[in-house]
Image: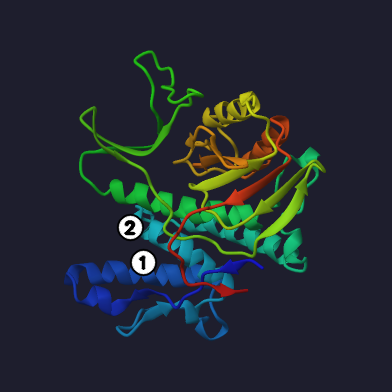
């Protein structure tokens, strides 16, 4: 059973702003009125919170209890991003970030609702290969991916608050000729999550690590009727795969081909403008007893990349695969839905 993190969250309090600069109070009041009207118009408020909203009282508070489930999902993922953007302070006020976020949330919830009647062993149900989808949007892998990309997007926006800098995401390490720099026995390239540039010089670069992990019961499926796959919780930027049944000297070509194809930008649909839909890292396979261990950072790659990776495992001759995170990871509070 998939578990989702739910907590009591306060998104806004008028008292937060009354303690600040007085001339800013009318501005934030205008923004909050517009926000509440927008939430009401899009049916995102709880029944007893619905209203016309012509003023914002000094005791105004907006929290989870004021929203329905769709509203909570939207605010958790997109409200901070919207408030940190220029949209609330434009004339007229823009809701483009929230509009796009709402479409994604509703699509996710629709698919999750459709899947919720199926037992947990069907969460990895294979879609029609003609559709080229490993999982329907809103199911397990989409949730794992979005949990990381939300964290990634927040880190990018935080860097952009610094003055006189340019922020670049998913930067490939390349030579002066623009060729990717490979390392290790398989000569694999690497992408840096964020690079901060000032006056043409990289001032800092760093990776963005997931802070949370989605929990679900470990389950097994058979991929393409050829490969038994055991799937345990993992993070999109820290996925481990144990490959069993390989010969003494495996031919890693299919795996390298998958990585290089997924590493190069392809302008996929459904990817936020900050992201290129690419993987960031793959380790060289390491022999560990009866299996080979490979680590992946899927970056912003779309969900179907995961299914293509399983095809590569079939091609190199694995007779079973375990996917998860085989080391200690800080757990987060979660409740079952």
Which quarter shows the C terminus? bottom right
Please tell me which residue lies in front, 119 or 35: 119
Q: What residue is shown at x 61% (from left), y 41% (from top)?
A: 291
Number of numbered discs overlaid on the protein picture: 2
Q: Are marks 2 and 1 in contact (CB under 8 Å)?
A: yes
Neighbourhood count class around disc 2 (C-alpha, 10 Å): few under 14, some 14–19, many 20 upward = some
Q: Give the distance between the C-alpha atoms of the residues marked 2 and 1, in whole angstroms.
A: 8 Å
Neighbourhood count class around disc 1 (C-alpha, 10 Å): few under 14, some 14–19, many 20 upward = some
Q: Position of residue 167 (x, y in %)?
A: 32, 39
Relative to 319, say whether 178 is above or below. above
Q: Secondary structure at mark 1?
A: helix
Which one is earlier in the sequence, the residue at label 2 or at label 1? 1
Please tell me which residue lies in front, 7 or 80: 7
Which quarter shows the N terminus? bottom right
| Residue 127 relative to residue 99: left or right | right
Q: What residue is shown at x 82% (from left), y 43% (from top)?
A: 225
Q: Which mark is residue 31?
A: 1
Q: Secondary structure at mark 2?
A: helix
Relative to 285, say whether 106 is above or below. below
**Residue lying farthest to the left in this orientation:** 21
Q: Position of residue 207 (x, y in %)?
A: 36, 43
Q: Which residue is mark 2?
A: 89
């Amino acid at each position: 059973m998939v578990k989702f993190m739910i907590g009591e969250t306060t998104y806004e309090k008028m008292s937060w702003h009354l303690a600040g600069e007085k001339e800013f109070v009318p501005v934030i009041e205008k923004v909050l009125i517009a926000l509440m009207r927008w939430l009401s118009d899009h049916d995102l408020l709880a029944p007893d919170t619905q209203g016309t909203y012509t003023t914002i009282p000094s005791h105004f508070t907006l929290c989870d209890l004021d929203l329905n489930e769709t509203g909570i999902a939207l605010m958790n993922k997109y409200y901070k991003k919207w408030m940190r953007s220029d949209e609330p302070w434009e004339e007229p006020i823009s809701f483009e970030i929230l509009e796009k976020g709402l479409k994604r949330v509703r699509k996710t919830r629709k698919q999750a609702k459709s899947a919720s009647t199926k037992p947990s062993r069907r969460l990895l149900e294979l879609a029609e290969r003609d559709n080229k989808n490993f999982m329907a949007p809103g199911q397990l892998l989409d949730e794992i991916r979005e949990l990381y990309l939300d964290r990634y997007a927040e880190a990018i926006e935080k860097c952009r608050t610094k003055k006189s800098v340019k922020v670049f995401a998913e930067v490939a390490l390349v030579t002066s000729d623009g060729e990717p720099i490979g390392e290790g026995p398989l000569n694999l390239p690497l992408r840096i999550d964020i690079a901060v540039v000032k006056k043409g010089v990289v001032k800092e670069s760093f990776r963005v690590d997931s802070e949370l992990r989605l929990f679900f019961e470990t389950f097994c499926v058979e991929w393409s009727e050829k490969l038994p796959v055991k799937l345990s919780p993992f993070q999109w930027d820290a996925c481990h795969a144990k490959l069993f049944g390989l010969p003494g000297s495996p031919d890693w070509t299919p795996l390298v081909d998958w990585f290089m194809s997924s590493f190069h930008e392809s302008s996929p649909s459904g990817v936020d403008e900050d992201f290129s839909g690419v993987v960031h890292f793959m380790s060289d396979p390491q022999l560990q007893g009866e299996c080979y261990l490979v680590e992946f950072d899927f970056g912003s790659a779309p969900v179907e990349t995961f299914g293509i990776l399983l095809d590569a495992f079939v091609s190199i001759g694995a007779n079973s695969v375990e996917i998860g995170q085989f080391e200690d990871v800080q757990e987060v509070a979660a409740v079952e839905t």
